[in-house]
Amino acid sequence: MANLAFTIGRGLAPHLRSVMGAWWLGQFDPFTEVSEAAKRSFQVAFPVQEKRLEALIFCGNEIFHYLDENLKLTPQTIHDKTAPIEELEEMHELVVSSSLLALASLLDVFIGTYLQRSASENGCFSDGLDLKNAAKARSSAITTAEKICRTHKFFQEILKSRSSRVRSAVYQVLLSFVKYVPQVFSEGDMKIPASIVLGSFQEKDPTCHSSMWNMLLFFTGKFPEAWRAAPLQKVILPRLWCFLRRGCYGSQQASYPCLLPMLSSMPPGTISAEQFFIDFFRSLWEGNSMCLHSLADRVALFRAMKECFMWIVNNASRYVEDGLCSIENFRVRLIECIIFKLLWYDYITKGKSYINNGALVDKDGALATKSIQTTAQNIQVKPLPNYPKSFMQELGNYIIEILSSISTLDPSLLHAFSDQFQIESLKIIQLSGDGASLECNQHMDQLSEFFSLLGTRLMDKGENWPLVYLARPFAAKSFPLIKSMGSPPAVTLLSIIISFFGPSVLPLESFVNKGGESHVQFHTSYNQECQPEVLLQFFKNNLVKWCLCMYDYSTSSRLDLLLAFLEDAYFQSQWDWIFGCAAEVENESVEEDVKTLSSDRITLLATLMEKVRYKFIDKKVLKKSRGMLGFEAKNWYSMRLDAVAVAIARRNTLKNPSCVQFLRCVLGGAEEDPVLLISKEAARLVIEELLKHLTSALMESPIAWTKYASSLILPNGIEDCLQTNKASLDETLQIANFSAQVLDGSLFCLKVLDDNFEIVPHILAAPIFLDWETRMSYKSGLSSSSLDLWEIDDEAFDKIDIGSAHYQGKSTDEISIDQADEGTAHDNAQEQDDIRLGFVKSVQALRSRITYFCKSFSLSSLNRLRWVLIETIRCAVFQEDVCEAQKIVLMCIEWVMEVMDHTCRDQDEEQQMLDHLLFLSDDCPSWAKPPALGESKLSTLKSINVPSEADKNMHTRFVMFVERIGLALGKDKLLFGSLTKTSHITMENTSNPIRNEISSCRIWLAVEVLCTWKWPGGSAVEYLLPFLCECAKKDPGHPQQIMVNSIINILFTGALTNSALDNFYPLNAWPISAEEVDKIEEPFLRALVMLLAVLFKDGSVWTKPDASRLLHYFQKKEFQNVSTVNNFTRIIPHILQILVPILRKRTVNLEENNQDFPLAELDTGNMQKNTCQWLQRGLSGPPLILCQMGQPDIEEWVRVAVSCFPLRSVGGMETLMMASAANISTQERELLLALFQKQASQEAISGYHALAAERRASLATVSNGDIRWEQARELSLARLMAVAIGYCWQEFGEHEWVFVLAQLRKWLESVVGHMEELAEGIHDATRVEVDHTIEYVEKVVNGSRDFPMDLAETTVFVFSLLFGFHNLDGAEMTSSLNFLKAVNWERAEIRAFEDILRLFFATGLAESIASSSCSGKAAGAVIALSRQRDVRFWENVAAIVLCAPSRAREAAMRAADLWGLRKGGINALYAILFSVHPISSLQWAAYNFLSTDPVQPFGVTKEVLSSQSEESTAENGEADQTTDMDSSSEEPSFVRVELHSVLQTPPSDLLKSHLTADNRVRYLLGWSLFLTRLQAVPSLSAARERMVQYIQDFGSPSTLLDFLFQHIPLKQSSSPGLKKKGNAAVIEATSAATAARQSAATNSLSFAVEALWPIGIEEMATLAGAVYGLMLRVLPTYVRDWFTSLRDRSAASSIEAFTTAWCSPQLLADEFSQIQAAGIADETLSIKANRSSREVIAIYKKEEAGMDVVIRLPSCYPLRAVDVECTRKLGVSENRLRKWMLSMAAFVRNQNGAIAEAVHIWKRNIDREFEGVEECPICYSIIHTTNHGLPRLACKTCKHKFHSACLYKWFSTSHKSTCPLCQTPF
């Protein structure tokens, strides 16, 4: 519009009068967009203010006329009548409201100050328009406005509109008329406008009230006579009262401030003053219900009440004209009716009074006042709201403010309130006695609160009227009544009055003289001060005796009153008198007096002290109290009080809760600002007694460490005293319970005693010990007679069957008798359990509070507490005689963390605590110990002795403890302490390159853990080695790397010092395995080897320079001590096994030298030089087979030399290639070959035979030592042979090869014989079914451990090297291999394969036989675990088994079956495949055996199933079926038992297990085997049909499919565009999808099974995807049935997307390829395929009949059924066509094979029909859709023939055995 106005410009002038009305109206549109647009366009058209005014004057008449016409409109005339009435009404409201606002604004422009101000500022208007024209415009506007107002009758009809917007606009326009055109109201009858304006109180919309009040107040101010003209009593006032009662309908903050101006505008003669104001305030007060939840509304209400009331009181003469007496009476009447009967009644009753016919009455009738006369006699009973507490307090304050204002105006007016107040208050007291109702007690509470507010007013403002007119008269009259009644609320009221107004509020002289029994006439002129002797006399003789006479329900209130009488001037005298009377003691020797104190008297004392503490030492009371001495704790000190407190704490009967309350009050400490009411010495004695009680309970525990802990915290000699004065268990616990409660409420008082007494850390430790004891008793399962509950709540405790153990083993009758006779005993037991539970809860509460602020104590207390706690933990860990050490250690770790968190304030204190904690005796640690104080060494080695069983247990606990500390604190914090980075360490600044002086490191602890190696629940490999690797990665000179070097130094020194002849001689294979390290018995060497293996693994931590320096350092150690040279040769082969493969690598650039070791890098030449020296030492002696026992030097040096030639653990071609690439010099090869040739020389062989013959001739008994020596020589020779073959095979001649094959044959026969003996031993041990089969099996296995499996491993490794020669290229063939062939290698190879296969089957047979025993899998697990000790050996065996030729496999299988054991070769394979403790390589070998020829045909089923041709199956399939009704259901014995048991795994066990659980792996492997065999069987053979039938009967394919999609992430695998990302789910989905596509394409699962190990979630997903892909190919029907039965639509959608994306394209392509390749076409049938439309077209012609059938395959094939449609028919009836189509659909749907096969079967079915074969009456098909058989079972009556499967299903579902047609028995 602004753009339009700007564009038109002056062209608007001719049309201005016609558009100005609408233009002006638009500026007041309720929609902001419209009004802003109108204003902007008006400003654009008239940019100057004068121009805008001139335009309005120019068009004034037209605007008024336009607005007048708008106000005359109705909803029916405003617009097109076809519009809905709702729209018309809304439009009418908008137009009328905007017109009214525009009219009001126009009046302001023309008649108001706007026009006058513009004229006065400018003097004249533009274009010659002067003031004269402005006056003319104003006069015209007034005339027009008057006419509009009268025409519309003061807008009376418009005001009736339902729209609040319209009504608000009326109020505004009326206000404008009152301001600018007042003559319109004054001329004529005032009744109509007065009724309209004053009647606006009926307005209920709060948004209109602001404009309504502005209009009303301006109108009544300008026309006060309107109050007389309006129907005040009949209309106006009722509306006003209703308006006020409704809380002004929500506009309190706007309306309440307007009430006073409204009242002031009323002429005096228009109202009946008294009645009007009573009704006004009553109505106003009734509206408080709308203000309860708004503070601002409440403030507005109270302010209006106060202002209006005080204005009326101040202007009483305005309404009363009869003189001063009448004015006074009027004011008194208002005070009585408004202040007292309205406000104060509501305050007392808390809003529970109600108005009944004008009378304010309490609901229970307790308060009744004279009726307040009102004209509204018919007001219904209306409950007032229940006021909240904040409202009541504000109401009380406003009542007091009004009374204060009245006292300022005229104090005598307060008598009106005071007299009524005393009368009603005394009535309240009388009704508050015994049996008083709840409402009466609430009235008393409100009365007390009112006096509190009065007292606060007195103290804050210094006003005297509350005392003179209310407190003093009331106290004087009420005291005799209160004393006689003794009501607690009344006494409390009196104590409040005394506490604020002082004892002088009472006429004490009268009470002393008259005994306080008579009423006193009390006047305001009574002297406030009383004589001291009168006060003390009344206090001692009257008040104290009455207040302390007995302990009852009013004692608390009387004590408040008693303490309120304390005056600063007589404080000490009064307090001594009070406590002496309360305690009934006369001097300080109160021990005997305390013993005779009754329970009530102790309760009285406790209550008294509680009052003292919480009412007179509370800082919040300080502002409201008269005296000051009571706020200083020293003023309450009393020797009597000290003596009583100590005596109560010493009592053995500290079981009264009042004792606890008393001690907690005098000790204080419940808050952070502790205040003692007794002396410090007395407090110390009390705390000491509490410690004794707690320790007595601790000493009741049977746990050993509690006795030690008690001795640490008890003073000397106290323990014996406690044992002598020992009480019963329950009494001890009860006293300890109350002691804990005392301490719980007095903890902060310990801060006061912290600097002066040592008792503080001991009393803090006692609850901690008790809490630890209960937790240990509960977690470790100890039977503690005292503390057998830990952290148990009431609900759990209620569920405990307390008496169940008592009745165990008794009959019902005996239990009934026991229950009848022992009811009391049961109650006692319940009471005892309650005592113990209460004690445990108290201890836990105290324990949590102590730990909360423990660090706030002094350093000395904290150190002592920490020392006591750590000593106790050490005792619990290392001396507690408990079998469950792990639980003990775990609990102690919790304690350690708690102690550290709550007592250590910085790292230094934490490290001091750890030093204290880990400091042990000489027996522990076992391998290394920390340096002594001042010693420079980092650690000291300990001599190894044979430890006792106790030492072993202690050491085990120590290491477990260290492990848990490291896990809790962090290993860096445990081992390094507060270590900071030291200077760079070089050869120049240290004498030892590996050791550095790092005093804060705990290197000895790391050595101890490494040497311990394994412990229950952990090992050094998992716990410490990863951390040490991270340390070793640090920069050179870093403290952590220095620590690793120091550990290596210590370990090597320990191994060199303590090494003995180790039976384990490692094969020099890389990398070393953890199993091989476990075989090392020497702890230092084992730890060193494993640490080096981890550090040099893959070169990620340390590299070749580090290996070179280490080797040089180790060699240097060899010559430092002559006594350790022999030990060096024993340990160095293990180290070389780690270092040499690193050093032998060929590198171009050597890494930069590191300064951690003394020498520079040891180059390859030095390595070769050392190797040559060691080889020459081996050559210097005789051959190994001629060495005699006692001369091990040569054999050991041979070991050292062999260790310098690394080999790969996998053997075969890889090892040969690695050896050829190793950095080996020619001299080394020559020396190695010479050393081997020396062993293979004819001289050595002849000498060996001569020695053997001599031994046989002597008939000497061979000792075990001789056998071990012989085995060691054989092992060394085997290792030498393996190294020589790897590095020197090209130089071998015929003689060397003959020697190798001879030794290999001998060793293999030995190994095979050992394994077969083991299998036979297991067979014999399990032949008889006995209960101890496992023990027999373990005995056989343990007896076989004497065989050197190291020799067996080396033997198999040697054969793998020889077999690796097959993979050499022709260029690599040498004359040496020709020599090997010349010595009949091929025959030897076959025999070796057979021997190794015999090993493979022997271990499988042993496990199978053991598992089939009565002990089941537990016995088989013994065999499986025995293989775990030699994993590398069995891995090499599995590798060779996989390479074995078919001839060797057949021979091994035949030998296993002919062995004569209970199990055969297939059983052995399944035992290995489904082993309880499997080895992955053996599992893969067993699976490969079972899934490939020649084992596969009989590996899944028990017999070889024939593979008949399709035609023979169709013709003769039914002939093989029995006539038995369950012939379609094969027995599960058809499948191998081992496989059947796996396939039948219960779904509940399977689907709920972990994704990598063993049962899941076995289940997948079992199905992989079965499906692999199924896809290998011809599709239309009987063998396949039988396997498919087995799946239907026993296989549960739905369980398998549910299982598979637990492993396949559906959401991530539904898209073929997946890429491997970091997300694990995406990786699993990608693997599963790829595997599904590959298996569907290749019909194979071997790739997924081979990649299954090591087992992981991704690997399991891969195999699951592969199995699913193969199932879609070989079992599509079952997959389809499962898919259609899914109820989860989301899962079904995801599965369909997955199949469509990854499997269906390949399956569809294969279907069409098979159709094209098969070329099925004859005279009657032809098949075509259309790949683009996924259609198969079958054209059938027979004689004169024919039809074209189209089979449409879905995109998710085979998940959804195909669509079969007949596109053309010829000579086929509708019935026959329908039947043929149904049969086609059935064959395609039920065919677990190709579509072409289903079509072929359908064609045969139709051919049979033409041949005259009858169809089955059940399925209406000739050929069965599932097993493809013919109907051959005929009914003897009706002669109809049925399929056996159909008939079986009929019998099963109908539960009958009759013919389906004739119903005769079949």
Image (spheres, rainbow, N blue to C red):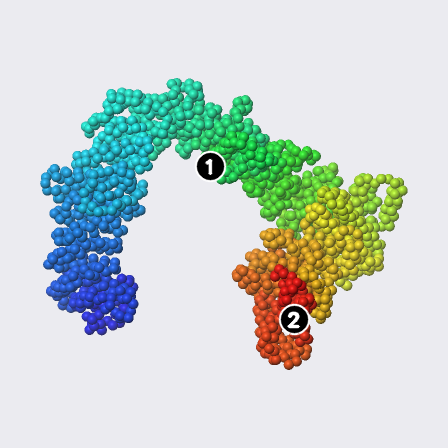
Residue that carries the numbered disc 2 in the rendered image = 1815
**Is residue 945 in sight in this rendering?**
yes
Depicted 1587 relative to depicted 1463: above or below: below
- Comparing 1786 with 340, the one in front is 1786
As drawn, the label of residue 852 is: 1
- Is 785 placed left or right of 126 in the picture? right
Residue 448: quarter of image? top left
Residue 1437 percent coordinates (x, y) = 74, 53
Between disc 2 and disc 1, whose residue precedes?
Answer: 1
Disc 2/disc 1 C-alpha distance (Å): 90 Å
* Mark 2 surroundings within 10 Å by alpha-carbon count, few (fewer than 14), some (14 through 19), many (20 or more): many
Q: Kindly identify the residue that appears in the image at 28 percent across and 28 percent down.
A: 482
* Mark 1 surroundings within 10 Å by alpha-carbon count, few (fewer than 14), some (14 through 19), many (20 or more): few
Depicted 1454 relative to depicted 1043: above or below: below
**Which amino acid lies under the numbered mark 1 shown in the image of this protein?**
Tyr
- Comparing 1411 with 98, the one in front is 1411
Residue 827 percent coordinates (x, y) = 50, 31
- Is 1061 placed left or right of 1012 in the picture? right
**Which amino acid lies under the numbered mark 2 shown in the image of this protein?**
Glu
Q: Kindly identify the residue that appears in the image at 43 percent across and 29 percent down.
A: 657
Element type at marker 2? loop
Residue 1125: quarter of image? top right
Element type at marker 1? helix
- Is 1485 placed left or right of 102 in the picture? right
- Comparing 1626 with 1121, the one in front is 1626
Q: Kindly identify the residue that appears in the image at 45 percent across and 34 percent down.
A: 856
